[in-house]
Amino acid sequence: MELYFNMYKIKYVKLDELLKVIIFEEGEEINIFINLESVLKKIKFTDEDKENIFYGPKRNLNLISCIFNLISHYRHYFNKRGICSKVFIYGPEGKDEIYLNREYNKNYRKDILLMETSNTISIGNIYRNIISMLKDILLYVKDVYFITSGIVEPSVIPYIITKISKNNKNFLITSDIYEYQYTKENFYILKPKMDDSILIDKNNVMQVLKKKVKCKSTLEPDINFISFILSILGNSYRGITKIKKVGISTIFKLIDTGIKNNIINNDVENINILLNVVEEYNQNQIMINYLCTSVKEQYKRLSISEVSYIEKQLINKHDAGYLRDVNDKYFMNYPLNIIEINGGIKKKQEKIIWR
């Protein structure tokens, strides 16, 4: 299991290379978001090492240790650079939920095998079993949180958090193309892929999309259209239907033609206006896709209780002594990197009381 999590840890030398263009201030605080589902998906669909991953007697503790040390890896990197951080690792609940997006798409996330728990050796079953313990452990690490999404699409969580934790820089560690739309919100996306790991931001996300499908188009639409583009591409993992015979090159051309004909401009966000650049027979499906894709649109539809469910998971009970005890009692075979995860904590200035 460690192998898959280690593949998700970008080497520090590579991180130095990727982040050299970003200016950091000494002691500044950033937000780090980690999409846990991205890693679990890779484990779910592997055919290698299943004996150790699924049948190991301590597989629950092993998974907790892997997640804990993944967080430690990234927090320690930024701490070494003199940068403080808040870390938010997030994922779905350990069972199927009646997601809000099923109001528009009845099959939304219905076919995700990751959370299949009928088979006791599935990664979904192991994940379900460790949620409570992992949350309890991370309660005692300051400014590190494990958040499950309830009936909300898990990838909306970073958007919700940035309304609370308003740091200037947000880093999202993910391999999920659905989350590329966060570049529009000025996120830096770190996509782990060993030596081929990349940094994706608003300046190169269109190039990344083209490279993925070997598109030779010279067109590159404005970042403002990213959610619209992803809606047309669809997302099979979430049950979002791809629009047939409309690939990246065609989408880029439709947008370019729409701008040249004054149908849209680079500032248009209204989906009803954007739909005017596509064929009428595709408009209804794209509208449904957009409502299930755009994190901004999904956030707008959230009730107070749904936002509160996320916010109530942001609890701090910082206690390094407790972590040491837990490590010694349960994790002798899978040690937790406690020192590394407790670095990078922003210290509050002491208030001087004049007498």
Image (cartoon, rainbow, N blue to C red):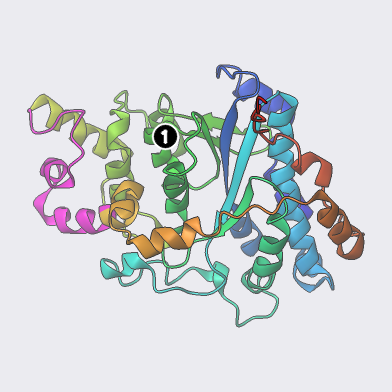
The foreground one among 81 and 177 is 81
Please indicate, yes or no, whether residue 134 appears anywhere in the rendered image. yes
The foreground one among 40 and 282 is 40
Quadrant of the rendered structure where residue 219 is?
top left
Give the x, y percent position of residue 307.
40, 58
Q: Which residue is mark 1?
A: 183
- Residue drawn at (75%, 54%) of the image: 66
Magenta-drawn stretch contains 63: no
Q: 230 above or below 184?
A: below
Q: Quadrant of the C terminus?
A: top right
At numbered mark 1, what does the secondary structure look like: helix, strand or loop?
A: helix
Please indicate, yes or no, whether residue 239 appears anywhere in the rendered image. no
Give the x, y percent position of residue 116.
56, 75
Magenta-drawn stretch contains 287: yes
Residue type, mark 1 in image:
Thr
Give the x, y percent position of residue 141.
72, 49
Quadrant of the rendered structure where residue 129 is?
bottom right
